[in-house]
Image (tube, grey):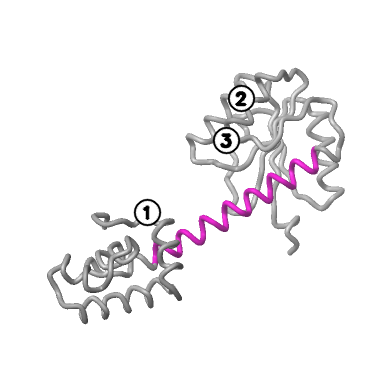
C-alpha cells in the first residue's frame, strides 16, 4: 500500500459542489477521502487509525470552523487542519494558524495549493504518529525498570558519578554499577548521551518515579 493510499483526507464543507470537486481532485492523485456537510456528521464518523488530515470550511452550519478546531482538540482529535473559506480575513487566518492549522486558503484557490497543503498536513500527522509510537515504546521500556533502577537512572542522567550515586542512595558503588547496567540494557541505550535524550523525552529527573 502506498503512503497516499494509506492516508485519509476528511473534507467538511456545507457546499456539495465544493465537496465533490475536492473529492475528485484527491482521487486524481490517489488520495482517499470522505466528505461531510456538517461538523456533526463528521463527529459521528469513526476515527481511523491511519495518517489523516481535515480540510475544513471556516463557516459551517451551526458552528464556526475556528471553534470547531478547538472542539476537536478537546475531543483528543489532533489531525492537522487545512482551512478553506470564501470569507477569510487576516485576523481569522492568524488565529487559525496560531491554533495549529497547516494552511488557510481563500476560495477560489488553485488545486495545487490545496494539494500542497494537504500533503504537508499528512506529513505532519505521520511525523506526530511516529513520535507518539516512539514515546510509547520508550515508556514501556521505562515501566520495565524497578523503582531503584529508576532512581539510579534519574541520578545518572543528572550527571552524578557512580560514587556519588552510591552515597546518595546509601549503597555500594558496585551495586550502582549493576543497576546502571540493567538500566542501559532495559532502556536499550547504547550510550550515556542516548540515555540522557531518552530521559529528557520521558521528563525523568531526580525525585520523579
Q: Is residue 188 above or below residue 53?
A: below
Q: Secondary structure at mark 1?
A: loop
Q: Secondary structure at mark 2?
A: helix
Q: Is residue 144 above or below residue 102?
A: below
| Closest to the observer, 16 or 50 | 50
Left or right relative to 104: residue 73: left
| Closest to the observer, 173 or 101 | 173
Q: Is residue 128 above or below residue 91?
A: below
Q: Is residue 138 magenta?
A: yes
Circle 3/circle 2 CB separation < 8 Å: no
Which residue corresponds to the image point at 71% horizontal and 34% vertical from the top-left?
Answer: 103
- Judging by the rendered image, the residue that carries numbered circle 1 is 203
| Coordinates of residue 153 in the picture (x, y in percent) | 31, 66
Please identify the dominant SS of the magenta region. Answer: helix
Q: Nearer the viewer, mark 3 or mark 2?
A: 2
Q: Nearer the viewer, mark 2 or mark 1?
A: 1
| Residue 43's disc number | 3
Which residue corresponds to the image point at 30% horizontal and 69% vertical from the top-left?
Answer: 145
Label 1 Cα neighbours within 10 Å, binned few <14 / some 14-19 / many ≥20: few
Q: Nearer the viewer, mark 1 or mark 3?
A: 1
User: Along the polypeptide, which appears first: circle 1 or circle 3?
Assistant: 3
Label 1 and label 3: CA atoms lie apart by: 34 Å
Give the magenta-colored segment's residue range.
114-140
- Judging by the rendered image, the residue that carries numbered circle 2 is 95
Left or right relative to 165: residue 98: right
Label 3 and label 2: CA atoms lie apart by: 23 Å
Quarter of the image with the N terminus is bottom right
Amino acid at each position: 500500500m502506498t503512503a497516499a493510499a494509506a492516508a485519509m483526507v476528511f473534507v467538511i464543507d456545507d457546499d456539495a459542489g465544493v465537496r465533490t470537486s475536492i473529492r475528485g481532485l484527491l482521487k486524481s492523485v490517489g488520495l482517499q477521502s470522505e466528505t461531510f456537510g456538517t461538523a456533526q456528521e463528521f463527529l459521528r464518523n469513526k476515527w481511523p487509525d491511519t495518517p489523516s488530515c481535515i480540510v475544513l470550511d471556516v463557516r459551517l452550519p451551526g458552528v464556526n470552523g475556528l471553534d470547531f478546531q478547538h472542539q476537536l482538540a478537546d475531543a483528543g482529535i489532533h489531525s492537522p487542519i487545512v482551512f478553506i473559506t470564501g470569507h477569510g480575513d487576516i485576523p481569522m487566518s492568524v488565529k487559525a494558524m496560531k491554533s495549529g492549522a497547516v494552511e488557510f486558503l481563500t476560495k477560489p484557490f488553485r488545486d495545487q495549493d490545496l494539494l500542497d497543503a494537504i500533503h504537508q498536513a499528512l506529513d505532519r500527522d505521520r511525523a506526530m504518529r511516529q513520535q507518539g509510537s516512539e514515546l510509547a515504546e520508550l515508556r514501556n521500556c521505562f515501566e520495565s525498570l524497578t523503582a531503584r533502577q529508576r532512581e539510579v537512572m534519574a541520578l545518572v542522567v543528572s550527571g552524578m558519578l557512580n560514587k556519588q550515586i552510591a552515597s546518595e542512595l546509601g549503597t555500594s558503588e558496585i551495586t550502582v554499577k549493576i543497576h546502571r547496567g540493567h538500566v542501559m540494557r532495559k532502556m536499550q541505550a547504547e550510550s550515556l548521551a542516548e540515555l540522557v535524550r531518552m530521559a529528557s523525552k520521558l521528563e525523568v529527573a531526580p525525585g520523579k518515579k
